[in-house]
Image (spheres, helix red, strand yellow):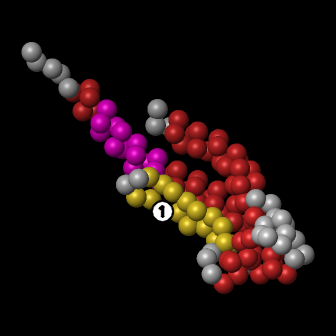
């Protein structure tokens, strides 16, 4: 039995081309979302009127990476230095949280990014 795999090969080539175009778009969207989230968190901490939170604002950062597992990102206070003031988000034995959970900023910015993700993914379909 003979099988014509011409269309399958063409699809594989098209998907390879789509990845080369789409992944950079998705990575840029993730980076913009992380930057916006970082800026929101810094602004909230700096404007809180709490000295420790103002110090924490200078140590909020984000990082994105792309590898074989895909695109990933992390945003929040850096470990060590003023980043140890992360208890301001979660509370400790002496007080409850004094800053909004970072997920508020992340959720808000992810919602803003959703149409851009949809467009980038729709372009390959």
Residue farthest front in this picture: 93
Q: Nearer the viewer, residue 35 or 78?
A: 78
Q: Quadrant of residue 117?
A: top right
Q: Name the side, left or right, on which 100 lies relative to 25.
A: right
Above or below, comparing residue 79 to residue 11 in the picture:
below
Above or below, comparing residue 120 to residue 6 in the picture:
below
Residue 122 x/y as whole percent: 53, 35
Q: Nearer the viewer, residue 124 or 49?
A: 49
From this viewpoint, is residue 47 visible? no
- Local SS, label 1: strand
Q: Residue at x 79, y 70 (%)?
A: 93
Please check the rendered image and state whether residue 26 is part of the magenta-colored stretch, yes or no.
Answer: no
Give the residues in magenta.
Answer: 11-24
Q: Quadrant of residue 46?
A: bottom right
Residue 32 x/y as whole percent: 63, 59
Q: Quadrant of residue 83?
A: bottom right
Please check the rendered image and state whether residue 23 is part of the magenta-colored stretch, yes or no.
Answer: yes
- Name the main secondary structure of what is drawn in magenta: helix
């Amino acid at each position: 039995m003979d099988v014509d795999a011409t269309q399958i090969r063409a699809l594989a080539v098209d998907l390879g081309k789509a990845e080369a175009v789409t992944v950079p778009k998705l990575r840029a969207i993730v980076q913009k979302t992380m930057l916006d989230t970082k800026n929101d968190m810094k602004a909230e901490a700096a404007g809180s009127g709490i000295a420790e939170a103002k110090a924490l604002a200078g140590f909020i950062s984000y990082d994105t990476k792309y590898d074989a597992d895909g695109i990933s990102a992390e945003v929040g206070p850096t470990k060590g230095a003023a980043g140890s003031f992360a208890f301001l988000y979660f509370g400790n034995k002496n007080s409850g949280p004094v800053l909004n959970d970072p997920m508020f900023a992340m959720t808000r910015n992810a919602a803003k990014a959703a149409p851009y993700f949809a467009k980038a993914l729709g372009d390959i379909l």
